[in-house]
Amino acid sequence: MNEPTSTAKKSALDILTSRFNIFEKYVNERLTSLTSRMVSQETTIAARYHMDTGPNIAHNTLTIVDFTDKNWDTHNMVTTGAAWHFTAPVPGFYEVKSALKFDGMTTWADGEQGYLAVYRNGLWFTTLDYKNNFGNTNDVAMQLSGSDILQLAKGDRVDIRAFQFSGSVMPVSSFLSYVSILKV
């Protein structure tokens, strides 16, 4: 029996290496897919944040709300600070709930307004609540709240933004101000 040449050996090794690499890529893709499905189907994905000290929302300025304090965050999906956001760890439907109460009682005149909105990947998605035309009412507490369901891809970012048009900076109360996000 003749011994294969070194060129034939190298060619056979190259073919085996190529086939192994293809097989390895297939196995890794399948494992990633299975892991993603396991996380999304068997694990609760949820985050809830509130604030101990409320921020100020400037007049006539759309502001990302920084919910600073974690109640829970099952997969460390939230980044706090001025660019507060939630990042979806897996694709799916997520329910977003939020409430924001402006601090104290004040006079809200006709035309003065506030709203709370959900943004996905930096773009407006929905308005959770909108208040306007209080009729020069004294001692009115403005509280905005609502919920909606978003379809998110893995890596999509969600943030909550507040707007108020009252003529001055409005402090936010830490009481009744929160966000919760749950994969449904």
Image (cartoon, rainbow, N blue to C red):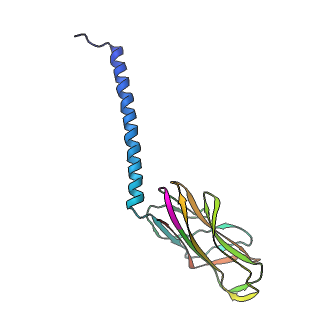
Horizontal side of 23 relative to 56 (left or right) equals: left
Q: Position of residue 53 (x, y in %)?
A: 58, 76
**Compared to 166, does 161 lie above or below?**
above
Residue that appears at 37% across and 35% down: 23
Residue that appears at 37% across and 61% down: 42
**Compared to 156, does 70 lie above or below?**
below
Is 118 contained in the magenta span? no
Find the residue positioned furthest to the left: 1
Given residues 64 and 114, the one toward you in this image is: 114
**Compared to 24, does 150 lie above or below?**
below
Query: What secondary structure do most residues of the magenta stretch adopt?
Result: strand
Question: Magenta residues?
Answer: 90-95
Residue 74: name its quadrant.
Answer: bottom left
Find the residue positioned furthest to the bottom: 138
Horizontal side of 37 relative to 65 (left or right) equals: left
Q: Position of residue 12 (x, y in %)?
A: 34, 21
Residue that appears at 52% across and 54% down: 155
Given residues 7 and 170, the one toward you in this image is: 7
Quadrant in which the N terminus is drawn: top left
Q: Position of residue 182 (x, y in %)?
A: 48, 66
